[in-house]
Amino acid sequence: MKDSDEPHPLSPARAPMKRQEPSVEQVEARRREREAEQLAWAERARAAQQPAREALELLLSLAERSDTGQARRAATFVAAVAGYQHFDMYSLRSLDVELSDAMLACLDGVRWAQCPLMDLVPRGRARIDQVCVDWGFKAP
């Protein structure tokens, strides 16, 4: 070990390093990056809405008109989106591809939501509430 007159780097005797302020160009570049990122997010959200609407319509229609196991899973998923029910994600593996893809499109719509998913379809809240009643799901 070498003896030195300099204090340890973490010692309070050492003067704190002065933070260098970013240049105007750096600040402006970061602002442009954030703006571009926000525009990309807005576009992604916009692009997710139509597939989510179509997917929710498919799932609601199935839950409203059928009483099969697939329809029950669709109803459970729709109820989960509204907060009425728990949905086991492993159920996706037991569904027809079209239905599991619809559920994933709904999840993408929830993820990038510009509005509640149920507002994307006509009478969405009322239809979901009725599906929950018809399938015996309780409100939270």
Image (spheres, grey):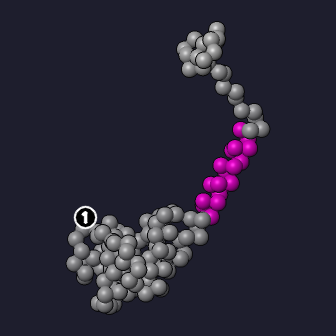
Residue 40 inside the magenta-drawn segment = yes
| Viewer-nearest residue: 60 or 26 | 26
Report the magenta stretch's main SS. Answer: helix
For image coordinates 62% across by 64% down, the residue present is: 43
For image coordinates 47% across by 85% down, the residue present is: 97
> Which quadrant of the structure image shows residue 100?
bottom left
Residue 70 inside the magenta-drawn segment = no
The percent position of residue 73, horizontal first and vertical second, equals 33, 81
The extreme top residue here reads 5
Name the quadrant of the C terminus: bottom left
Q: In the rendered view, tell whether residue 104 sits above or below residue 1.
A: below
Which residue in the structure is indicated by mark 1?
140
Q: Amino acid at mark 1?
A: Pro
Which residues fall within the magenta stretch?
Answer: 27-43
Q: Judging from the image, what secondary structure is the residue with disc 1 in?
A: loop
Quick check: 132 left or right of 20?
Answer: left
